[in-house]
Amino acid sequence: MKLTVNGADYALDVEPEMPLLWVLRDELGITGPKYGCGIAQCGACTVHIDGMAVRSCSVEVGAVDGEVTTIEGLGTPESLHAVQAAWIEHQVAQCGYCQSGQIMAAASFLEMNSEPTDEDIDAAMSANLCRCGTYPRIRAAVKTAAAKLNGA
Amino acid sequence: MGRLKTIGRRAFLVGSAAVVGGVAFGFYLYKKPVENPLLADLGSDEAALTPYVKIDAEGVTLITPRADKGQGAYSVQAAMIAEELDAELDQIRVDPGVPSPAYWNRALADEAVPFAATDHGAMATAARGTVGAVMKIMGMQVTGGSSTVADGFEKLRIAGAVARETLKAAAAQKTGVAVARLRTQGGAVILPDGTEIPYQELAAEASRIEPVTEVALRQPEQWRLIGKPMLRVDTVAKSTGTLHYGIDAKLNGMVHAAVVLNPRQGGVLNSYDASAAKDMRGVKKIVPVTGGVGVIADNTWRAFQAAAAVECEWGPAVFAPEMADHWAELEQAFDTDPDSRGRDEGDVENTLGETPLTAEYRAPYLAHAPLEPINAVVLIKDGRVDVWTGTQVPRFTQNNVAAIAGVEPEQVHIHAQMMGGSFGHRLEDEVARRCAELAMEMKGVPVKLTFSREQDFGHDYLRPAAIARMRGAVAGGTVKTFDLDVSAPSVLTSQMAERQGMPMPGPDSSISQALWDQPYGIENYRVTAHRAQNMAPVSSWRSVGASQNAFFHEGFLSELITAAGGDQLEQRIALCTDDVSRRVLQTVGEMSDWGRDLGPDRGRGVAFCMSFGTPVAEVVEVTNSPDGIRIDNVFVATDVGRVIDPVNFENLVQGGVVFGLGHAMNCEITISDGGIEQTNFHEYEGMRMYQCPRITVKALERNSHIRGIGEPPVPPAAPALASAIFDATGVRLREMPFNKFVDFV
C-alpha cells in the first residue's frame, strides 16, 4: 500500500481498515494529529486529504485516495502557514492538544470560504472540541487568518 | 501573605551546586517538624532542595517543577525566574526538573524530594481541619489548588536574583572588574565597556564560589516581564504540531499497549479468554493486570482491537450499582453526624420563622475528560525503572511504580511529560501503575500504554455527586437567615486514603469548600457538611468542592434575594464583608452595565465565589430564543493581586468560564451496574464553539495576596447561568445539568 504524506511517499504493510490516524502516529511517527475520541467527535485528529479536512481516526487508510497533509506539512515554526501565525498571534493554545486539529480545520475551511461571517466560523469550527475552552481566541484567530489570506 | 513570609524566614540558600559542566541555583529549606505522625511517611524528613536555575555550556535552563497541563505553568514559572535573572524567555529552556541524576549532584539528589519543606506545615494544618484540607494539600504538595503562582511568586524570583548576583560575582572574579560596575541583560553579564559575557561562560566560575545570598527583589515598576503580555514558551510548538505530549513519546523498540478493565469500576477480573485475541496481527502478549487484561502489540490500534476481542468474566460491583442508589446514599447521609459545621453564626433555628424558604439542589458526577487520554511509557531494565508520563503527582507515582516493580523509589525515574489537559485527572496515576504491570512482563522493552477514550471515561475518578438542602428567611428586604446542609462523598478519603494510602484524619473540608468560607455577613448563617458513603470513587475536579458548592450556595442566595425583593448584585455587595471581594462585585457590575434594559426575552444573572483565595464575580446574559437558551455575554471580574501574564490570564479565565458553563449545560456521569455509563464525547458534550458567549475579563490588582487563576473562574459560571435563565424564563434551576430542564441552542 502506498501513501503520500506531507509530500513524502511511503510504502506500507498494514491492514487497509487501520484508521489513517494510527498509520500516521504509530507506523510513520507523525504525531501532530492527535487521538482524542476515535469516533470523529472531537476533531483532534484532523488532517487534509487533497486539501479537504477529514477526521483521520475515522478514515480507513485503504480508503485514502489523495495526498495527506498533517499539521507538520501545513507549516513549520520556521515557515508558518497564515493560520498557524494567527494562532500564535492570538496565543490560542492552553493545553494545545486539540489545536493541531483546530488549525487544520480552519485552514481547510478558509480555503473554501475566504470571507467568512462570524456565523460561518462558528458553524465550521463547532465540530472541533476544545476542553480548555479557547473558543474566543479560536474565533479571533480565524478572523485574523482570513484577513491575512485575503491580503488585508 | 503569611505563607510567603514563612518561606522567606525559613529559607536560606545553599545556592550553587556543581552539576555536570555547570552550576545550579536553588533553595535549601529548613526542616520543619511534622505535627501529625500520620503524615510522616510523606517524606517529611529533613530538607527539600529545589533548584530552579541550571546553567551549563548549553545555556540557561529554568526548572519549572509545577506540572504543565495546559495552564501555562512552565511559562509563568520561567517568567518569574527570568524576571530577576535578566534572561529572555526565548533564550532559555524549561525543564520540569523532577529528581534527575542527569544534572543533579548525587548528594543533593538524595535530599531532593518534590515537596517543599513548608508543605508539611501546611499539610499538618490541613489535617487539623482548620483550612480546606484537600486544597492545601494539593496546593503545596503537588500541582493543583491554583497554587503555582502563589507558591512561586517570591521564591522563584529570589532564585533568579541569587543566580544573577552570583553570576556577577563570578564575572568580577574572572575579569577583575568590581561587581558594582557590572550589569546584566539578555542572559549575559555586561562589562563597563559593553563586553557581554554570556551566563554559560560563567557557569564553571560560579560553581566554585560562595553564592551571593543577600539579594533584594526588584520593585514592580522595574519589572520587564511580569505583568506584561508575553509569548508563552509553548505557543509556537502548540501551533505547529511540534509539541510532544506524553502520548507522543517514542523510544527505540517501544511496544504499544491497551487495557480492558472491569466496567464495574474497581471490580476484579474473574477470568478471561484471549484465544481470539492472541492471534490477531501485531499482538505480542496478553496478560492480566489489576482489574482487567492488558494487550501488548506493535501498534496502538492493533492493541485496542485485540483488547476488544478478549472475552472477560468480571467480578461484581464494588459500590452501589445504580445511580438511584447513589442519590439515596447522599440523602441518607443527611441523617448522619455532620462531618463538619464550618459556620454557625447567629441563631438559625429561631429565626427561620413559620414558613422558611426551602430548596434542594443537586449536582451530578462529572468526568475530567482531558482531550489527551491518559497514557504512560514504562521501561524496566536491570533494576532501573523509567516512567514517561504527564503527572501532577510525580512523587506518588514514583512510590507506586516502585512497589509494582519491586525496587526502591529512587530506582524509579519520572520523566514528566507535557499534558493535553488534566482538570485533575493527572492527580491520579492509575495509568502508570497499569503500565508498570505490563512493563514487568516485557522487561528491557519500553511499553506505552494508551487508554482508549472509552476506557478513560469508564475508569475516571469523578467529581462528587452532591445534594444540598437549604432553609432561609428574609426580612426588611434582605437575607436574614441562611442554613445549608450539604452531602457529598469524601475526595480526601477516596483519593488520598484509598488510592494513595495516606489516611487523612479529621473532616474533609472539600465537602464544604466555598460554602462555609464565603465573605458574606448574614445574621444567621450556618453551613453543615455530611459525608456520604458507598459512592463511586471520587477525585479533585477543576475547582474541587467549589465546582458544585458555588452552585448550591449562590443558587439559594439568589432565591432568597428574589424573595426579599432585592437586586441580585446590590444585595451581594451589601452582604459582602471583604473589601477585595466587594470591589470585584462592583467591578463586574460596571463592566456589564448592570441594570440596563436588555430587551425582550433576555435575562441576566450574577454569581460570586471565593475559591483558593481568589474572589471571582461573573455576570451572564442570555436570550430565551425559539431554539433554546443562548448565552450571549459573560463578564468576569477577579483579583489575584498580581497578574503575571495578562494574555495567558485572560485565556485561563475565559476557559474556566467555558468549562463551568459547558458542564452545567449538558454534562453528567451516571452509574449503572456498578459502572460509568458514558463512554465518549457524544454522551458528554460540553460547550462547542457556536454556543460560546463573548467573555470579557477584568483583573484587579488590589488583593494583597498573590493568588492563582486556574480554577477560580469555574465555580461562579453555573449559578450565574442559572440565575440568568431564571431572569429570562422564570424557570428556577436547582439541578445540573440544566439541559434536563431547558433547551440550549
Image (spheres, helix red, strand yellow):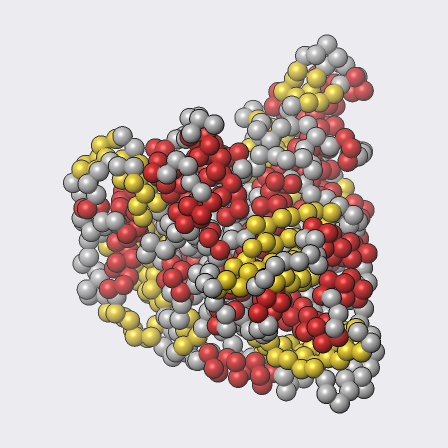
Q: Is residue B186 above or below residue B365?
A: above
For the question of whether residue B484 can be seen, the reply is: yes
Along the line of sight, which residue is nearer the eye, A26 or A5? A5
Left or right, B117 with respect to B737, comes to: right
Q: Residue furthest top?
A: B193
Q: Position of residue B556 (x, y in %)?
A: 67, 73
Q: Position of residue B696 (x, y in %)?
A: 62, 48
Give the residue displayed 44% in from the left and 48% down from the top. A119
Q: Is residue B286 above or below residue B372?
A: below
For the question of whether residue B526 can be seen, the reply is: no
Left or right, B572 with respect to A65, comes to: right
Give the residue displayed 73% in from the left and 32% down from the top. B223
Q: Residue furthest front?
A: B600
Along the line of sight, which residue is nearer the eye, B92 or B50? B92
Along the line of sight, which residue is nearer the eye, B54 or B299? B299
Q: Is residue B2 above or below residue B540?
A: above
Figure quadrant of residue B539: bottom right
Q: Is residue B400 above or below residue B217?
A: below
Give the residue displayed 22% in from the left and 49% down from the top. A60
Along the line of sight, which residue is nearer the eye, B445 or B160? B160
Q: Position of residue B525 (x, y in %)?
A: 77, 75
